[in-house]
Image (cartoon, grey):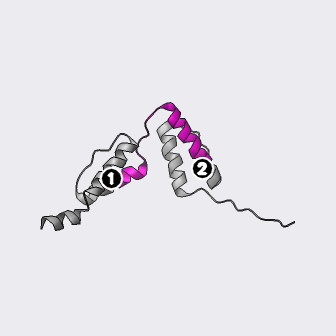
Amino acid sequence: MSATATTVKAATGRQRQTIADLARELSYTDVPEPRSTIHASAIIQRLIEDRDSSGVKPAPTSRQLRMLERLGDERGKDYKMPATRAQASAKISQILAAGAPDDQEAVAA
């Protein structure tokens, strides 16, 4: 019999941020700290199930909000922050489809 050592991978930064976003969205204060990537995935799954069963539309993620702020800074505009994750995704897609500020200046010239 051979003994195999199993290594436990720590939760990733993205997993930790997702847990924080979902906990904030659900107003949960007692979410456990993930011990591994597998544990983090289980926590995320449970939080998503709780959110979906409540019927509340998910708020934009912090990543989406940062992206909108960055796009606004690049273009010199202030974008209204959307109320839902789907609206934020649609707004980001719309802004990106319009092209980068450098592309717009080249077309105008």
Task: Give neighbour class at mark 1: few <14, some 14-19, many 20+ (Cα, 10 Å).
Answer: few
Q: Main secondary structure of the magenta part?
A: helix
Q: Quadrant of the C terminus?
A: bottom left
Tags 2 and 1 in contact by the CB under 8 Å rule? no
In the image, residue 46 lies at what x, y percent?
59, 41
Q: Which residues are magenta?
A: 40-69
Precedes in sequence: disc 2 or disc 1: 2
Residue at far left of view: 109
Q: Quadrant of the N terminus?
A: bottom right
Q: Secondary structure at mark 2?
A: helix
Horizontal arrangement in the rendering, residue 54 relative to residue 60 (left or right): right
Magenta span has 46?
A: yes
The Cα atoms of the two marked residues, 2 and 1, are separated by: 27 Å
Q: Quadrant of residue 86?
A: top left
- Dot 1 corresponds to which residue? 93
Task: Give the vertical position of 46 relative to 15 (above or below).
Answer: above
Residue under the point 35% across and 43% down: 87
Horizontal arrangement in the rendering, residue 86 relative to residue 79 (left or right): right
Residue 79 vs residue 85, the one in the foreground = 85
Q: Secondary structure at mark 1?
A: helix
Task: Give the vertical position of 72 relative to 52 (above or below).
Answer: below
Horizontal arrangement in the rendering, residue 100 relative to residue 43 (left or right): left
